[in-house]
Image (cartoon, rainbow, N blue to C red):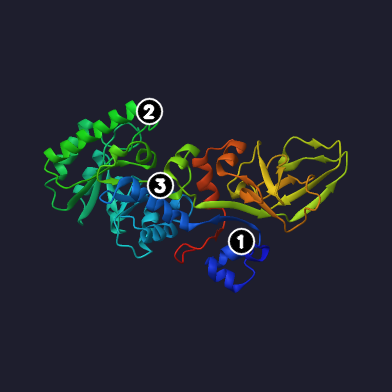
Amino acid sequence: MTRSASISASDADLRRTDCRRHDRTRLLRPSWAELDFGALRCNVERTRAMVGPKVRIFFVCKGDGYGFGAAAVARAAAHAGIDGFCAGSPEEVVAIRSTGTTLPVLLFASTTPDDLLEAARLGATVTVQSLADMEAVLQASDPIEVFVEVECGLGRFGLHRDQWRTVLQRLRPANNVKVTGLYSHLGTPDDRETSRAQADLFRQAAKDAVEAGHEDLILMLASSRIVLAYPEMTFDAVDPGRLIYGGGLDENWMDIGQLAPLLKAVKSRLIHVQEQPPGTVLGIGYGAPIALERAMRTAVAPIGFWDGLNHVPPLGEVLVRGRRCPVLGRRPLQHSVIDVTAVADARPGDEVVVMGRQGSEEISVHELARATGTSVIELVPRLARCLPHVYIGQEESGGVA
């Protein structure tokens, strides 16, 4: 990508990337995340191939679509053929519905019981995961559609066995409540024995639902890792997130799923290059002073911990002109200071690759996570949410910002 394209120098480029006005302004401070929505489509296809045509795919858009924008990813995923959405907050329900989709949107537990009806009025199927939730929906003045969440071992939300029977029995005759499905999450997907025991508990909940008179419920247990590791646990529907974003999974799971990352690269540009003579003391980011015994060339890129990176070392390396260059000191709020001594011709305007490929070198998201002491599942949504987006590739996001 040329400098003019990344800084949005032409109207044609602006229309092609469909950047919002404030994002065009933000790109004058040249740091950005490159997204390939063609990867999302490919990952939906891969998920469909794994679960089969009869299993519904409820695409998880929580965390504002893992930082990529709930509306943007929802629109792209709907075009790719998913069957429904999962949201983590009422505002994500609004964002998903703003795309015009009529697909179901399941709202994971995120409100107080008193606010369930208001959330449902936004166009959500709400979660009943406690006795208090049950009482709230039974007293709702409007018809309300719900999924019941049962606790099988994650230890976060959900009804225990001595509770779910009561809830299922009491909801069955309620004229204003439509119970659409039953779901849960497994707590230890790496432990096969424990996961299978938890899945058996879910099967018991499904059996209890039938005995309580519920018919044709959508049974959903498998998130991304479960889809990949336990094909026998797909039931009627799955709720993958990381699988479709192609990020946040360990490298071996990415390979197993043959996944492509939506977050293709994180980049910046040098805005300052400085020759530092021997004896100079650098106190970068208010960290421990760095006393230079020999001359050094330093450069500054306008990307810092405000943009989703870490502050305290280790900070890892970046690519400048195809060469690996270490990041110095502590990373400031909005900048990174880089040792470019090995890049004699480095100058302002040069592209800086924090994650991605430049020439024959590449810094993967997994390498960046290891180098900065951060987990991939934490790093990807932080970078995606903090940085302005530039769409790349032949297939863009269906006209989303």
> In the drawing, does residue 145 fall left or right of residue 45?
left
Labels 3 and 1: the sequence-earlier one: 1
- Examine the image and state in which quarter residue 3 appears: bottom right
Residue 237 at x, y percent in the picture: 28, 46
Residue behind mark 3: 241
> In the drawing, does residue 13 fall left or right of residue 217?
right
Q: Label 3 neighbourhood size at 10 Å, few (<14), some (14-19), many (20+)?
A: many
Q: Amino acid at mark 2?
A: Asp
Comparing marks 2 and 1, which lies closer to the viewer? 2
Residue 259 at x, y percent in the picture: 45, 47
Residue 271 shows in this picture: yes
Q: Label 2 neighbourhood size at 10 Å, few (<14), some (14-19), many (20+)?
A: few
Looking at the image, which is closer to me, 143 or 267?
A: 267
> In the drawing, does residue 173 fall left or right of residue 351?
left
Calculate the distance from the C-alpha at mark 2 to the C-alpha at mark 1.
Answer: 45 Å
Residue 266 at x, y percent in the picture: 60, 51
Secondary structure beneath disc 2? Answer: loop
Residue behind mark 1: 26
Q: Is residue 399 above or below residue 189?
A: below
